[in-house]
Amino acid sequence: MFELLAEIASNRRVTEDTWLMALCSAKIARTANPGQFVMIRIRTGLDPFLRRPFSICGVKEDRFQVLYRVVGKGTHLMTELKEGESLPVLGPLGKGFVDREKPTDRILVGGGIGIAPLLFLSQFHGEKETRFLMGFRSARDILSPQTVMGEARACRVATDDGTQGHHGPVTDLLEETLRENAKRRMVYACGPKPMLRKVAEMTLALEIPCQVSLEARMACGLGACQGCAIKASPQSGRSYWYVCKEGPVFNAEEIDWEMI
C-alpha cells in the first residue's frame, strides 16, 4: 500500500455518465492485483473531505485506470480535472480475486460500472482464458473492453431494454453458459447486489466456485471506520465482514445473501 500524489495522464468520457481516468504511479501499477481498489481524494483541500473508493480497471506500464460514474458532487468534480493535475491516492487496497482451483474456464459476469475490476482480471489472464458476460441498462450505457482498455475482448452483452444483445438480465446469459458441460469452471462477478445475489444462488446450487466483488460506501479503506460492514454467512464463522479490508472480493458462500 502506498500513499502518494498521482498525476492524471488522461480523463475522458466513455458513455453519457461514465468517465475513465488514467493516473501515473509505477508503484501502484506494478503491485496491484485484479479486484483491488484505490482511495482517491478528489481535491487537496477539505471539500470534499473524504476519499472515494474506485476499483482499478487496468494497468499499463506506470499507469493505472479507474472507471467512475457521475452520481454526486465528488464525481462531478472529477470530470473537471485535467491532464497534468495530481490527486492524493492511497492503494492498492483490499483483497482481490484468487483462483481457488486453477480453473480452465473463467466466466466473468459484470453489471454496469461493476465491470471495472473484471476488465483488469480479463487483462491479467488474457482473452483465451476468460469468457466475459456484461449487463447494462441500455445500448447507450455499454462499456466495451475496446473503449476502456484499448483491446478487443470477446464478450456477450445483455441490456435491460433489449437495445443491444440479449434482452434481459445478464444472469440469463450466465444460466445459458452454465448449462455447458465444462470442467473446472469458476465464476467471478461484480455489479448491483440483486445481480450478485442471483449469481451466488446459481453457482452455489451447482457447486461451482464463485467469487464476488462487493461495492460499498467507505470512508477510510482500511477497516478503521467500520462503515462498510456486511453480514457474513453462518457457515463462515463470522458475524460481519469489512468490505474494504477483508474484501472487496469474497467467496460467494461467505456472504449472508438474505441480508444484502
Image (tube, grey):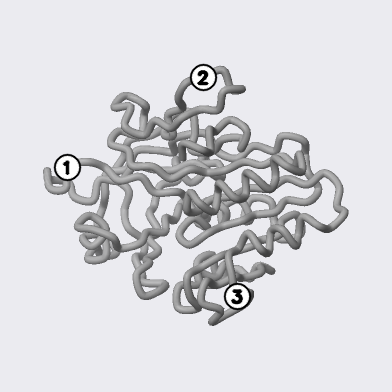
Q: Nearer the viewer, mark 3 or mark 1?
A: 3
Residue designated by label 2: 238
Reply above or below: 228 against 25.
Answer: above
Q: Earlier in the sequence, mark 3 or mark 2?
A: 3
Tag 2: residue type?
Arg
Residue 5: mark: none
Q: CA distance from mark 1 to mark 2?
A: 32 Å
Residue 167: mark: 3
Q: Residue 226 appears at what percent x and percent y?
A: 33, 27
Residue name at image x 33 percent, y 42 percent: 217
Q: CA distance from mark 3 to mark 2?
A: 39 Å
In the picture as drawn, the residue positioned furthest to the top comes out as 237
| In-front residue for pair 97/30 | 97
Q: Residue 131 appears at what percent x and percent y?
A: 71, 59
Q: Residue 213 appears at what percent x and percent y?
A: 52, 44
Secondary structure found at label 2: loop
Residue 49: mark: 1
| In-front residue for pair 57/239 | 239
What is the crowding at mark 2: few (fewer than 14 residues within 10 Å), some, or many (at least 20)?
Answer: few
Tag 1: residue type?
Phe
